[in-house]
Image (cartoon, rainbow, N blue to C red):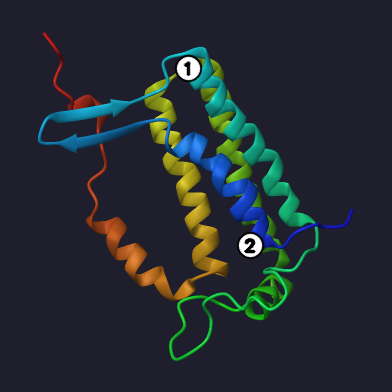
Amino acid sequence: MKAVVSVKELMRFTIDPLADNIFDAVTWDITKKGIAETKPTTEEDWEKVKIGAVTLAEAIYLLKVPRPFAPDGDVNNSTGPNPPELSPAQIKAKVDKDPVLWDAKIEALRNAAKEIMQIADRKDVDALFEASADVDNACEACHLEYWYPGDRAAVDEDARQRARFDPSARKKKK
């Protein structure tokens, strides 16, 4: 099997857009007018979630196919003093040094996507909200390892400061 695009392009044109089918499925927007809630309610809504999960679960395995980490000439945002991103060569060196970790990151995202597939079949909005965090965490863990490891301290601090939504804390409508 021969790759057609780089990791960066696979993420941009396949993995990221389809993950949005999951991430955008359940949202709350708090405004002056109140809370605007988005959640899947129709068969089409749930099918869009399932399409995102299936594609994500399958497409992430394409990262096991040897391919460049960025297109020719693209060095990410890896130049200058204290660059925020690793260069493609630095990423490749990390993967070559520990391919088991690379595979583990891929498996973590695949498992999270498979969980979403099952949730979409059950049409469980609360479970979808919770499991989408697992997808996000799997993505972020890989990016912090291979793309922008310098952000780890800030991301960890942000996670410590966040309050987690507790569905049981919602007031029951009368």
Q: Nearer the viewer, mark 1 or mark 2?
A: 2
Asked which quadrant contains residue 24, the reply is top left
> Closer to the camera, 174 or 20?
20
Q: How crowded is mark 1: few (under 14 residues within 10 Å), some or many (20 or more)?
A: many
Location of residue 129 with respect to 85 vertically, above or below: above
Q: Quadrant of the C terminus?
A: top left
Mark 2 closeness class: few <14, some 14–19, many ≥20 residues within 10 Å: some
Residue 8 in the image, given as x and y percentages of width and height: 63, 62
157 on left or right of 147: left
> In the drawing, does residue 51 fall left or right of residue 46?
right
Q: Which residue is drawn at 52% across and 62% down?
A: 143
- Tag 2 residue: 8
- Label 2 residue SS: helix
Residue 135 vertical position relative to residue 2 in the rendered view, above or below: above
Residue farthest to the top, as pictured: 174
Q: Label 2 near label 1: C-beta < 8 Å?
A: no
Structural distance between the alpha carbons of marks 1 and 2: 32 Å
| Of the pair 9 and 152, the residue shown nearer to us | 9
Looking at the rendered structure, the kind of residue marked 1 is Lys
Residue 155 against residue 163 in the figure, above or below: below
- Residue 123 — which label? 1
Residue 94 location, quadrant: bottom right
User: Disc 2 marks which amino acid?
Assistant: Lys
Q: Position of residue 66 (x, y in %)?
A: 80, 63
Residue appearing at x 55%, y 60% in the figure: 142
The residue nearer to you, when weighing 113 against 88, is 88
Task: Give the mark nearer the N terminus: 1 vs 2.
Answer: 2
Dot 1: element: loop
The residue positioned 24% from the left and 52% from the top of the image is: 162
